[in-house]
Amino acid sequence: MRVCFISHSAGRYGAELALVELLQGLLCLGVEVLVLIPKKGPLLDELERLNIEWRIVGYPVWMSRPRRLRSRVIRLLKTALMSIRVAWIIRKWNADVVYTNTVVIGVGALAARLLRRPHVWHSHESLKHNPSQKFDLGEQTTSYLLHRLSAAIIATSHSVKNDYKHLPDPDKIRVVYQSVTPCANAGSREPVQNRLFFQCVIIGSLHPWKGQDQAISALAQLTDRNINAHLLLVGDDGRRYRAQLVQQAKDLDMTRRLTFYGYAEDPLLLIRNADVVLVCSRWEAFGRVAIEAMLAGKPVIGSARGATTEIIQHGQTGLLYEWGNIEDLTEKIQFLHDNPEEARRIGHTAQQWAANRFTQNRYAQEILDILSEVAPNLSGTTMHHFSTGKVAVSGAAVSEIVENEPVASGMAEMETQVETSNRGAI
């Protein structure tokens, strides 16, 4: 099977890390992959390391902070035009399935539709829980396209799946938990020696969504209770929000009790040196940080929202608190501080629970099963059934179909262009 993956960025964040894990697993299962990205970035280093083909195509996202109508229209037009370029690459590489790794881009789905190839959409984010991000076409129209242009929609959790329960065909939506593969020494839970304070760590981009302000407020309450605690904030720099957090720390006289670490490519060592890992997000689609902490044998305190509640079994594999309730968060941190044996028990239980559930082999096999369903016969002509009830022919007949498309002339012109790739020209 040959699968073309479309990534919304070349960064190294949650969706991209999940993509790398999936690619590694699929390669072991004999799947051939091609990855399209919009620009250069750290993801390319991972693809080079895995010897995976890639192409850079400057397609835009169709979801961001609200913009003026003119900007949205221009971006949508660019999406439509770039889908033709992407379709040409997919056709030239002869992909069996097109796989869009996030719902914030639409070029992969449009390109797959032009070619009559099956398309899979992987939703790593919520359609409705982040008010700062809006779809250019609006939520209702985008939801319609997600359903119409997909043979399957993969959700990272049941919390994400619930965002799609209004779609006409719920059977299209599959929940597949990501894999999280730690380094070889992730299982070490040796305590840090000669430390006089209780180390709390929160990992994530500096953004109000991640709730770092709640962790700082809880730190202040812990100090009032004569608990010698320290907070390490790990994440890239959101300048405006960081300035707010710095001012909050000054107002609470907590400046000496917290550290802004910045971005950490591999936060494992920081997790291992923590006494507790905090997940204070307003809502999480999956919760990679929580799993990383569990695999390292560390207790996790998370907000009782989104997929965090699917990962943390309160009192067994972690502790949950009511999001926004600083008193509740403080109580949970103090409980682990005052009961180190219980903290170790929770960390150990979580480690055992997570070890066999978030493996790369399981993740890749579940995705491959879905890919095999949407493209069940890769020899000769394949019949794919779409939600409209119509049947489209692909495989050996794709070339003939594309030649009859209105975009054929535009695709033909692109065959004179050379694509940037780690394999050279297409």
Image (cartoon, rainbow, N blue to C red):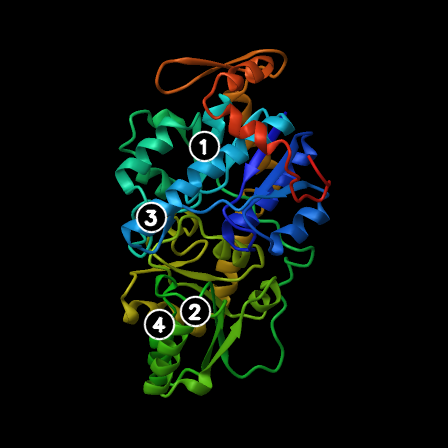
Q: Position of residue 322 (x, y in %)?
A: 29, 60
Judging by the rendered image, the residue that carries numbered circle 1 is 109
What amino acid is at disc 3?
Answer: Arg
Q: CA distance from mark 2 to mark 3?
A: 24 Å
* Disc on the earlier residue, 2 or 4: 4
Asked whether 346 or 298 is in front, the reply is 298
Give the quarter of the figure containing the N terminus: top right
Q: Is residue 35 visible?
A: yes
Asked whether 360 or 11 is in front, the reply is 11
Circles 1 and 3, Cβ within 8 Å, touching? The answer is no
Q: CA distance from mark 2 to mark 4?
A: 13 Å
Report helix, strand or loop for mark 2: loop
Q: Position of residue 229 (x, y in %)?
A: 45, 80
Asked whether 89 or 223 is in front, the reply is 89
* Number of numbered labels in the structure image: 4
What amino acid is at disc 1?
Answer: Ala
Q: Is residue 268 left or right of residue 14?
A: right
Residue 238 tag number: 2
Residue 72 tag number: 3
Q: CA distance from mark 2 to mark 1?
A: 31 Å
Judging by the rendered image, the residue that carries numbered circle 4 is 213
* Disc on the earlier residue, 2 or 3: 3
Circles 4 and 1, Cβ within 8 Å, touching? The answer is no
